[in-house]
């Protein structure tokens, strides 16, 4: 199966945060992929989790930059991740297919990821 996709892992250094670098980066990505879905995972908001305030700030950052919740949660042995998106909605099956493609079937199986909607 051939896909028109790129997998990226992005992070902004702590020193650069709060100065617009992350928003500029997301704006450039959204401009380049204007007619495509962009999906990402963030740690699920959980009041009991360490760094809860940081999780809230992260979600608000993505919301300010045009991302909305897909209403899908990726469950890993290490915790839950919320799937956010721009563009049209991503279905549970599309997310699973994307992960199988990105990780390969073996590593997808090894991740033990489950998706809740």
Image (cartoon, rainbow, N blue to C red):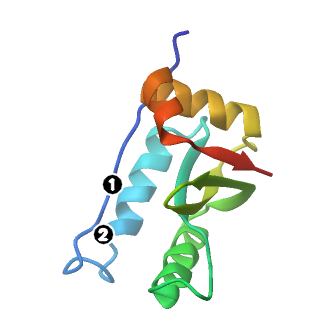
Which of the labelled discs sits on residue 10, or is there none?
1
Count residues near mark 2 (Cα–Cα under 10 Å), then give few for <14, some for 14-19, many for 20+: few
Q: Quadrant of the N terminus?
A: top right
Q: Residue 102 in the image: x percent, y percent?
A: 46, 29
Q: What residue is drawn where x is 19% and y is 81%?
A: 15
Label pair 1/2, CB-CB below 8 angstroms: no
Q: What residue is drawn where x is 62% and y is 77%?
A: 45
Q: What residue is drawn where x is 28% and y is 67%?
A: 12
Q: Is 67 situated left or right of 92 in this image?
A: left
Q: Quadrant of residue 26?
A: bottom left
Q: Residue 97 in the image: x percent, y percent?
A: 63, 27
Q: Is 22 situated left or right of 51 in this image?
A: left
Q: Residue 68 in the image: x percent, y percent?
A: 68, 62
Q: Earlier in the sequence, mark 1 or mark 2?
A: 1
Residue toward you, 78 or 67: 78
> What SS does tag 1 mark?
loop
Disc 2 target residue: 21
Q: Is residue 50 above or below residue 12?
A: below
């Amino acid at each position: 199966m051939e896909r028109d996709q790129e997998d990226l892992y992005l992070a902004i250094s702590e020193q650069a945060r709060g100065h617009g670098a992350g928003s500029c980066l997301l704006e450039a990505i959204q401009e380049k992929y204007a007619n495509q879905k962009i999906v990402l995972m963030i740690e699920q908001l959980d009041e009991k989790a360490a760094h809860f305030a940081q999780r809230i700030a992260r979600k608000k950052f993505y919301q300010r930059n045009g991302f909305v919740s897909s209403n899908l949660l990726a469950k890993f042995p290490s915790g839950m991740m919320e799937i956010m998106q721009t563009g049209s909605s991503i279905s549970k099956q599309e997310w699973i297919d994307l992960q199988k493609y990105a990780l390969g079937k073996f590593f997808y199986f090894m991740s033990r990821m489950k998706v809740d909607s």
